[in-house]
Image (spheres, grey):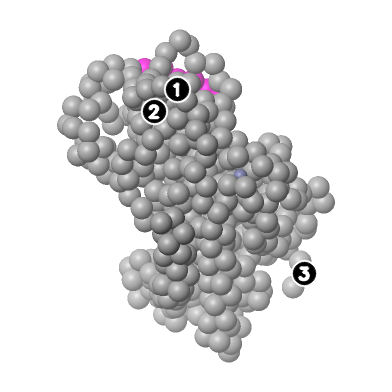
């Protein structure tokens, strides 16, 4: 097979400045070679690719990607942007907030939704004094659910003379090239005693559950509980409540009444431990799958998302054997899986594709769909899950025990 990727000559390398503490020294704790610039089904190969590097800051421990210019980041979205729809969780979030802060919590308050340009959380709030949405671009549908919109980068956008009682950022902070400046800006726009409600992928839980998707270029920062607390604390926010700590972190922070910056609380081991865990899990999964599929030369995959692209990028020997990829999304049909010469087809063509096995990366999809097809199906999700559980016990738990011992 001819190479389906072409390495971008001017791709960025190295960490020039920590995204959280601005320190200039980082340890490289991982490198994924030849990651396609476009993660989602795309045009004909060859597909531009670059080496994705993971760093841990030596000064604050923040886990993050190499420094990337805004121009380079914009290339990720050139080939049709993929909008993550996080609105599915809005009802659950609202319920959790009301449970904690009271049924009438949002009534009469001024609320800002940062990053809600597509499906704003403020759209499900009744009785607020004012509902604002800030995002790079705000869709007409989102604007219709808000009283005010501010288009542009939150860090530099001009806000009229207003402060907010509550600011929400759901799956937003990990995308900022400068999350420190974003949090600094939060301190400017939140009133004393006001709340910031943040949800981010939890690098710890997410890496354990979906290790192959534990690092990819759309997420520039990888937070865990201590690192998020540390960043918020340094700009004048106290931890108020932890709602969730599984694949995501959902946390409330309260702005101190005296605007004050504080020395950052530093956790130097968890970020590095997550990176090590990720690497170990990938190696183990590689080994298990090589054995399992040793006699299978023609492989199909169900599901053509970013997670599939990262999975195949990490296992190039498996990618070479892929002869079919199937997905229900008609928008993906006829487009190529990044890094391959294989097109996405509709699922009704599964049985006419001659394959030795079809892989499902998620147990949920395997359980609901595998029996429909004659092709032998494999639940790779179950393998990921068992490796995650096994490695977690010996990996991160150990770190937490050590961290507690060091703190006491
Ligand atoms: Zn740092």
Distance from disc 2 to disc 3, alpha carbons, whole Å, reads 56 Å
User: Do the CB atoms of the residues marked 1 and 2 lie less than 8 Å apart?
Assistant: yes
Residue at position x 53%, y 82% in the image: 288
The reply to whether residue 382 is visible in this rendering is: yes
Above or below for 396 versus 9: below
As drawn, 335 above or below 189: below
Residue 322 horizontal/vertical position (percent): 60, 73
Q: Residue at x 36, y 17 (%)?
A: 147
Question: Horizontal placement of 52 versus 93: left or right?
Answer: right
Label 1 belongs to which residue?
259
Q: CA distance from mark 1 to mark 3?
A: 59 Å
**Magenta span of residues:** 144-152
User: Which quadrant of the figure shows ligand 1?
Assistant: top right
**What residue would you read off at disc 2?**
255
For label 3, the SS is loop
- For label 3, the residue is 2
Q: Quadrant of residue 208?
A: bottom left
């Amino acid at each position: 097979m001819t190479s389906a990727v072409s390495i971008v000559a001017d791709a960025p390398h190295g960490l020039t400045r920590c995204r959280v503490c601005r320190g200039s020294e980082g340890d490289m704790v991982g490198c994924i070679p030849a990651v396609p610039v476009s993660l989602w089904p795309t045009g004909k190969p060859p597909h531009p690719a670059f080496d994705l590097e993971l760093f841990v800051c030596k000064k604050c421990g923040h886990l993050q990607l190499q420094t990337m210019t805004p121009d380079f980041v914009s290339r990720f979205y050139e080939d049709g942007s993929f909008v993550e729809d996080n609105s599915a969780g809005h009802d659950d979030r609202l319920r959790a907030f009301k449970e904690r802060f009271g049924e009438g919590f949002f009534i009469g308050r001024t609320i800002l939704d940062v990053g809600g340009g597509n499906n704003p959380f403020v759209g499900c709030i009744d009785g607020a004094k004012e509902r604002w949405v800030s995002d790079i671009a705000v869709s007409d549908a989102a604007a219709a659910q808000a009283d005010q919109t501010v288009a542009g980068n939150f860090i530099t956008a001009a806000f009229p003379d207003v402060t907010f009682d509550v600011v929400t950022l759901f799956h937003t902070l990990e995308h900022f090239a400068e999350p420190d400046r974003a949090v600094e800006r939060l301190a400017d726009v939140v009133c004393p005693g006001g709340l910031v409600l943040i949800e981010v992928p939890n690098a710890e839980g997410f890496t354990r559950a979906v290790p192959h998707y534990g690092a990819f270029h759309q997420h520039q920062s990888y937070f865990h509980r201590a690192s998020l607390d540390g960043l918020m604390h340094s700009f004048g926010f106290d931890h108020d409540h932890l709602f969730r700590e599984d694949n995501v972190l959902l946390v409330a922070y309260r702005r101190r009444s005296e605007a004050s910056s504080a020395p950052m609380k530093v956790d130097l081991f968890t970020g590095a431990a997550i990176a090590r865990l990720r690497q170990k899990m990938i190696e183990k999964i590689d080994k298990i799958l090589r054995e399992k599929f040793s006699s299978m030369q023609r492989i199909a995959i169900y599901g053509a998302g970013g997670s599939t692209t990262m999975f195949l990028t990490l296992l190039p020997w498996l990618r070479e054997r892929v002869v079919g990829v199937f997905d229900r999304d008609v928008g993906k049909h006829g487009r190529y899986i990044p890094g391959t010469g294989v097109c996405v087809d509709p699922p009704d063509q599964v049985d006419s594709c001659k394959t030795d096995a079809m892989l499902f990366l998620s147990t949920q999809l395997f359980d609901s769909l595998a029996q429909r097809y004659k092709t032998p199906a494999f639940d790779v999700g179950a393998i990921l899950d068992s490796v995650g559980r096994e490695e977690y016990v010996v990996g991160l738990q150990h770190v937490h025990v050590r961290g507690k011992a060091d703190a006491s």
